[in-house]
Amino acid sequence: MGIQENLTEVRNKIQQAALKSGRNYEDVTLVAVSKTVDIEAVRTAYSLGIRDFGENRVQELRKKQAALPEARWHMIGRLQTNKVKDVVGQAALIHSLDRWNLAEELDRRASLVGVTVPVLLQVNISGEEQKAGFDPGELDNFFASADQLQAVKILGFMTMAPLSYEAEKARPIFKELNHLYRLYSRKTYPNTQLQYLSMGMSQDFEVAIEEGANLVRIGTAIFGG
Ligand SMILES: *Cc1c(COP(=O)(O)O)cnc(C)c1O
């Protein structure tokens, strides 16, 4: 199947899952993860109405962004501190803020060039050791320190289920992140306006949406591979 047929199917599934959770298709933003495909495939998706693309490497993001600047480019992968200067002011949203010193570096760089950096906190719900992200128990501390940030804007949470999990097995993980999202949304923190819940990939996006995701990051179900 081609990108057009894949997209039709993905969009239908998004709509059905959104309805199941009492929402509409428009309430869920589809980020097409283009990390494994070339700019031609990106252009095809853009011509079919996709406006948000996700990349997990800064260099690749910048390259594709230069070719298609009218799209919104999301940084979804692990961000090294020495790449921060290349992504600040460029990425529409960084989904993968996973440690305090990265927040500090983003803040420092963004302040230098006078921009703000919208970010999501990546949370490691599954507790896999090799997985990036804050432990849920570290979030209190993070928000308690958020007043030290000036240019970083915290807009939500992101998580990934273990790659080996089937969709239903991932459900408790998505439920838990939604729980944290609602918990922290009840309070007011500096530089924080929680509005995005980024969860769900090709293998599990329907379950993630049923559990409240409003940003899904989908690669292979759109582009194949
Ligand atoms: C690659 C990637 C995705 C998309 O994965 P698919 O299984 O291809 O849909 C989503 N999120 C992150 C963080 C990724 O690295």
Image (tube, rainbow, N blue to C red):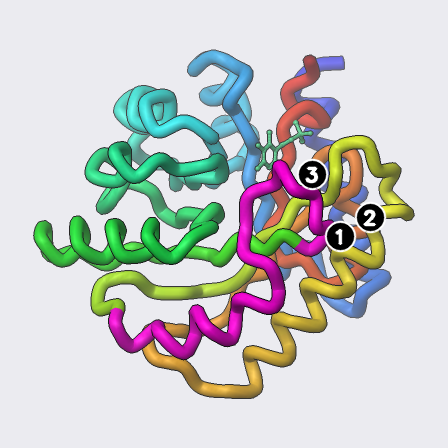
Tell me the element at label 1.
helix
Identity, as a three-letter code, of the amino acid under mark 1: Ala
Sooner in the amino-acid sequence: mark 2 or mark 1: 2
Q: Position of residue 73 (x, y in %)?
A: 39, 38
Residue at point 53% right, 15% down?
37
- Split into 4 quadrants, where in the image is the C terminus? top right
Identity, as a three-letter code, of the amino acid under mark 2: Ala
State which region is magenta.
Answer: 125-148
Is 147 included in the stretch rendered in magenta? yes
Q: Where is residue 215 in the image (x, y as percent from the top left)?
A: 59, 52
| Residue where numbered disc 3 is placed | 201
| Residue where numbered disc 2 is placed | 170
Sooner in the amino-acid sequence: mark 3 or mark 2: 2
Residue at point 65% right, 50% down?
199
Is 219 included in the stretch rendered in magenta? no
Tell me if residue 11 comes above or below residue 224 in the rendering: below
User: Depth check: 58 or 1 in front?
Assistant: 58
User: Depth check: 71 or 101 in front?
Assistant: 101
| Residue where numbered disc 1 is placed | 208
Label 1 crowd bin: few (<14), some (14–19), many (20+), radius 10 Å: many
Identity, as a three-letter code, of the amino acid under mark 3: Met
User: Depth check: 120 or 78 in front?
Assistant: 78
